[in-house]
Image (cartoon, grey):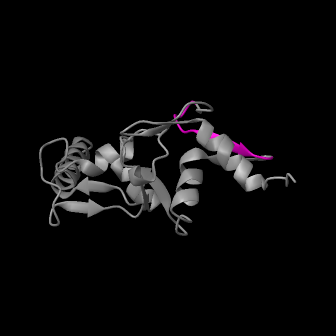
Amino acid sequence: MNRPRPVQALAAERFWARIDKTPDCWKQTSSIAPNGYGHFSIGTQTVLSHRYAYELLVGPVPDGMVLDHLCRNRACVRPEHLQPVTNRENLLRGKSFSAKNAAKTSCANGHAYDEGNTYRRPDGTRDCRTCRRNAVARYAQRKRAGAGEGQ
């Protein structure tokens, strides 16, 4: 007697049929979004393929964490290439504008971003204390020069 197969088993079969397991990455061969991530539908729900594979083979992604592709291939679903990290850590590991700025060790004028020379703004961004001090001095000098003209 043929029993109907569970929906989860059928979904897993469909999922793995779309994965090309090479010796390096396990790449999804279909349903790749413009941002490079694979996605997969289970009924009416669409899930990210790398997350689906991770949860299927490893277990749930810890609360508050996202999966970082250590291989930098967004279509890869190989669990060994995925690491749960905070969203902040994932962004800083990437190639975004924020990641590039966070990796800088000095300001545009070459002053070091170290503990004594770095000002942290309330919004989390940073400034060079030396450059800020110089800018304030230039502003004060302009104000003094302008005040003397009216006499």
**Where is residue 51 drawn, in percent x and y?**
56, 53
Q: Main secondary structure of the magenta part?
A: loop
Q: Does the magenta stretch include residue 52?
A: no
Q: Is residue 38 magenta?
A: yes
Looking at the image, which residue sits at the far right?
A: 1
Residue 2, compared with residue 116, is above or below; it is: above
Q: Which residue is drawn at 59% across and 42% down?
A: 16
**For the image shown, how many numbered marks are present on the structure?**
0
| Quadrant of residue 94 within the rendered picture | top left
Q: Does residue 143 appear to the left or right of 50 in the view shown?
A: left
Residue 46 can be seen in this image: no
**Where is residue 18 drawn, in percent x and y?**
60, 35
Residue 114, compared with residue 105, is above or below; it is: below
Task: Report the front residue among 145 and 5.
Answer: 5
Q: Quadrant of the C terminus?
A: top left
**Where is residue 149 drawn, in percent x and y?**
23, 41
Looking at the image, which residue sits at the far front?
A: 1
Q: Which residue is drawn at 45% across and 47% down?
A: 78
Q: Residue at x 39, y 50 (%)?
A: 81
Residue 51 can be seen in this image: yes
**Where is residue 3 drawn, in percent x and y?**
85, 55
In the rendered structure, which segment of residues is drawn in magenta?
34-43
Q: Quadrant of the N terminus?
A: bottom right
Task: Report the front residue among 110 and 80.
Answer: 80
Q: Does residue 119 appear to the left or right of 89 in the view shown?
A: left
Q: Does residue 81 appear to the left or right of 118 in the view shown?
A: right
